[in-house]
Image: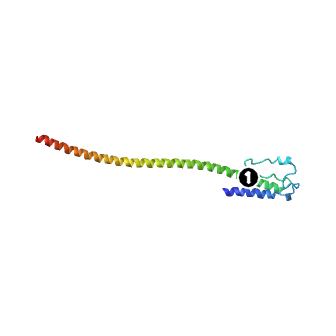
Amino acid sequence: MQDCFAMVASSAATFKSLLHPHFGCNGNRGFPADDASSENFPLAFPELDQQLQPLPPCHDSKESMQVYKQHCKIAEEYHEVKKEIALLEERKKELIARLEQVEKESMDAAQLAKEYAELTEENRTLKLAQTQCVEQLEKLRIQYQKRQGSS
């Protein structure tokens, strides 16, 4: 994308150098003779940097008009690329936010899985302890009954 910006800046410099007195525009270095005619070409791209603005063409020169139209076309393309970049940057922010959310959920899921494994192990240990206690209780009952029966 930076190459596109460089191309537009380079094109602007090239076009400005083409708008030169040899185009025969009253010796005003490519600009119309009077200020009134430059009002016919207001800043066509107000959001574009001043140095990238298409210069008003020399009405007496077909080549100057052609260069102006070409510069306007490139400026429009530049504007479209900038809009697309802005949209892509916004989409990037959305995707980063979504990725962070998914990572958080993934960490939450990993934490829950770890907790589940720990609780499952604790449950197994407690069941084993319960079984041992039941067996021990049964042995104690048998011993108690033997003592009761022998007395």
Residue 74 percent coordinates (x, y):
73, 54
Q: Which percent across, then down, holds residue 78?
A: 70, 53
Front residue of 134 and 106: 134
Secondary structure category for the residue under label 1: helix
Judged left or right of residue 88, residue 121 is: left
Instruction: Please determine whether, in this image, residue 144 is positioned above or below residue 75.
Output: above
Q: Residue under circle 1?
A: 75
Quadrant that contains the N terminus: bottom right
Residue occupying the far left of the picture: 151
Return the residue nearer the eye: 10 or 111. Answer: 111
Q: Residue at x 16, y 44 (%)?
A: 143
In the rendered view, does 143 fall on the left or right side of 121? left
Residue at 60% x, 49% y is 91
State the quadrant of the C terminus: top left
Amino acid type, residue under disc 1 in the picture: Ala
Q: Is residue 148 above or below residue 25?
A: above
Q: Determine the residue positioned at 73% across, 52% down.
A: 75
Q: Which residue sits at x=79%, y=54%?
A: 68
Q: Position of residue 133 (x, y in %)?
A: 25, 45
Nearer to me, 141 or 52: 141
- Residue 127, image x, y percentages: 30, 46
* Quadrant hosting residue 12: bottom right
> Dot 1: within a 10 Å radius of its alpha carbon, few (fewer than 14), some, or many (20 or more) residues?
many
Number of numbered labels in the structure image: 1
Rendered image coloring scheme = rainbow
